[in-house]
Image (spheres, rainbow, N blue to C red):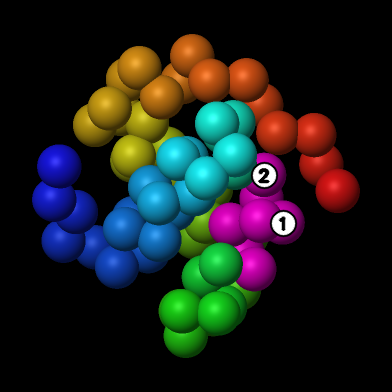
C-alpha cells in the first residue's frame, strides 16, 4: 500500500518492526528522526489514518509504553 503522507509512511513502517501497534513515544521518535518534528497529536492522527486504511493492523497488541 502506498501512503502519500510522509508521516503516515513513517508510522506504517513501525507496525511491522515489533509486531505491535507503535506507542506514541516510538512514533514521535521516528517522526523526529525523519525530520517531521515530534508532535504527539500528529503521530496519533497518522496512526489512526493508517489503521483506518488497513483495519487488520488494529488487531495487533498495543505496545507497552516505555
Q: Quadrant of the N terminus?
A: top left
Left or right of residue 8, residue 40 in this image: right
Answer with the quarter of the image where residue 20 lies: top right
Residue at horizontal 80%, vertical 34%? Answer: 64
Vertically, is 4 above or below 64?
below
Vertically, is 35 above or below 39?
below
Vertically, is 37 above or below 23?
below
Residue 36 sits inside the magenta stretch = no
Image position, residue 44 (x, y; %): 53, 48
Name the residue furthest right. Answer: 66
* Labelled pair 1, 2 in contact (Cβ < 8 Å): yes
Image position, residue 63 (x, y; %): 71, 33
Image position, residue 59 (x, y; %): 49, 14
Residue 45 visible here: no
Left or right of residue 53, residue 51 in this image: right
Residue at horizontal 24%, vertical 31%? Answer: 53
Answer with the quarter of the image where residue 57 lies: top left
Alpha-carbon span between mark 1 and mark 2: 5 Å
Which labelled disc corresponds to residue 12?
none
Of helix, strand and loop, which one carries label 2? loop
Residue 28 sits inside the magenta stretch = yes
The residue identified by callout 1 is 25
Residue 54 visible here: yes
Of helix, strand and loop, which one carries label 1? helix
Badge 2: few (under 14), some or many (20 or more) residues near its Cα, within 10 Å? some
Image position, residue 26 (x, y; %): 66, 56
Badge 1: few (under 14), some or many (20 or more) residues near its Cα, within 10 Å? some
Which labelled disc corresponds to residue 23?
2
Q: Which segment is the magenta one?
A: 23-29
Amino acid at each position: 500500500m502506498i501512503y502519500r503522507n510522509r508521516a503516515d509512511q513513517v508510522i506504517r513502517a513501525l507496525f511491522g518492526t515489533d509486531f505491535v501497534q507503535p506507542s506514541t513515544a516510538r512514533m514521535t521518535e521516528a517522526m523526529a528522526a525523519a525530520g517531521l518534528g515530534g508532535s504527539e497529536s500528529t503521530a496519533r492522527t497518522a496512526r489512526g489514518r493508517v489503521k483506518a486504511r488497513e483495519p487488520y493492523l488494529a488487531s495487533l497488541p498495543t505496545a507497552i509504553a516505555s
